[in-house]
Amino acid sequence: MKLNSILISKATLILVLLFACFISKAQTDNNQNNSQGDSTKIYKEEMPEFPGGETKLFKYIGKSMKYPKWEAENRISGTVYVSYEINEEGKVQNARVSKGVIGGTGLDNEALRIIQNMPAWKPGKVNGKPVTVKFTLPVKFKL
């Protein structure tokens, strides 16, 4: 029965993540841009990409997730929001829980573990130059 609940939980997570949107912001050198005083300059931006795209990201999260035992036994569920950056080399850095689940620190820790262990991404770029990009990803745990 527990295995069935965990499988349903992973399937639910994948479906929720398919509809979740990434909140991101590319960091650029504003000092350089403002020194020219040209506010009409056009920038070509490329967002970071998980190896294989969003579908592979959701599969990675589903396969990596291990529902914490204590939270499963106590029927604790919810959504953990993890903020992180993909740096110029495509690696995850500065991952932190921006909003956790009350009474579910195991869920918070598991979401953070999953994000911190992601493989390197294709880095984001602005005008062909690699940049750090911030993301917030909701990770839903449901029994």
Image: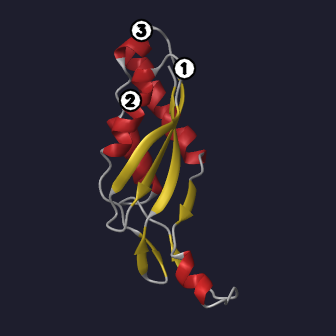
User: For the residue labelled by badge 2, is the local secondary structure a helix, a strand or a loop?
Assistant: helix
Q: Is residue 43 visible?
A: no
- Label 1 CA crowd tier, 10 Å (few <14, some 14–19, many 20+): few
Reading the image, the residue beneath label 1 is 102
39 with respect to 94 (left or right): right
Q: Residue at x 49, y 12 (%)?
A: 75
**SS type, badge 1:** loop
Q: Around disc 2, counting alpha carbons within 10 Å, would you say few (fewer than 14), some (14 to 19), or many (20 or more)?
A: some
Tell me the distance, in whole angstroms, between the alpha carbons under discs 3 and 1.
16 Å
Q: Quadrant of residue 25?
A: bottom right
Nearest the camera: 18 or 1?
18
Query: In the figure, 38 relative to 2: above or below?
Result: below
User: Label 3 belongs to which residue?
Assistant: 73
Instruction: Find residue 120 and report its horizontal and vertical position in percent.
Output: 30, 58
Q: Quadrant of the N terminus?
A: top left
Cα gap from disc 2 to disc 3, whole angstroms: 17 Å
Left or right relative to 141: residue 94: left
Q: In percent of the image, x 43 and y 22: which residue is there?
A: 105
Residue located beneath label 2 in the image: 109
Amino acid carrying mark 2 in the image: Asn
> Do the residues under discs 2 and 3 have CB atoms within 8 angstroms?
no
The image shows residue 92 at horizontal and vertical percentages of 35, 53
